Image (tube, helix red, strand yellow):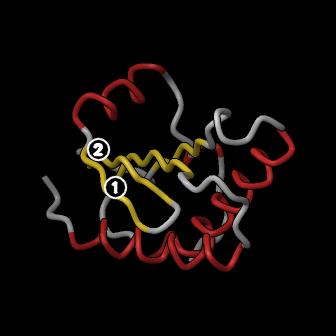
Amino acid sequence: MDARLPKTERLRGTTSVAALFEHGKHFQAGCLRVKYLPRPDEGPSRIVVSVPKRHFKRAVKRNLLKRRIRESYRRQKSLLVGVWDLLIVYTSREVLPYENIFADMSVLLREIKTVNHA
């Protein structure tokens, strides 16, 4: 199991993100909302994390939450089956502890695993 999160697993580029917004499906698990889209090509699943500036004005808090989300994904990414593009948005208005984010990420990844690969 590769427990790293290299640059090849980060979703970037306007066309990839636009396709995710246009064709992706979404649901919420606790403090996390995910927008997901299966990818037909081979390679690792890619992820992008967002914490709204509307709820957290200070960059320090936004960065803390993004680190917690990326870390919980990195530790559990083996739960995913298939190749996906994922946008994970933090929806709580409070800074939750890492354990809560980890539990919500687990629910989220297990739910994506049950989705039929288009």
Residue type, numbered disc 2: Asp
Q: Element under label 1?
A: loop
* Relative horizontal placement of residue 103, taking residue 21 as reference (left or right): right
Which of these two is toward me, 55 or 34?
55
Residue 10 got which mark?
Answer: none
Tell me what residue is drawn at x 60 percent, y 75 percent. Answer: 102
Residue type, numbered disc 1: Val
* Relative horizontal placement of residue 83, taking residue 52 as reference (left or right): left
* Relative horizontal placement of residue 40, taking residue 87 as reference (left or right): left
Check whether the beta carbons of the residues at disc 1 and disc 2 lie within 8 A of each other. yes
Tell me what residue is drawn at x 17 percent, y 59 percent. Answer: 117
Q: So how many labels did they put on this image?
A: 2
Which of these two is toward me, 35 or 59?
59
Q: Which residue is mark 1?
A: 83
Measured as percent of width and height from the top left, residue 96 is found at 70, 67
7 is higher (above) or lower (below) than 106: above
* Relative horizontal placement of residue 7, taking residue 37 as reference (left or right): right
Measured as percent of width and height from the top left, residue 118 is found at 13, 52
77 is higher (above) or lower (below) than 103: above
75 is higher (above) or lower (below) than 66: below
Query: For residue 57, what is the image quadrant?
Result: top right
Measured as percent of width and height from the top left, residue 67 is found at 74, 56
Q: Earlier in the sequence, mark 1 or mark 2?
A: 2
Q: Element under label 2?
A: loop
**In what quadrant of the picture does the N terminus appear?**
bottom right
Tell me what residue is drawn at x 40 percent, y 53 percent. Answer: 34
Q: Residue furthest top?
A: 14
Q: What is the C-alpha distance between the residues marked 1 and 2? A: 8 Å
- Pointer 2 local density, CA inside 10 Å: few below 14, some 14–19, many at least 20: few
Q: Which residue is mark 2?
A: 41
Nearest-to-viewer mark from 1 and 2: 1
Measured as percent of width and height from the top left, residue 43 is found at 41, 51
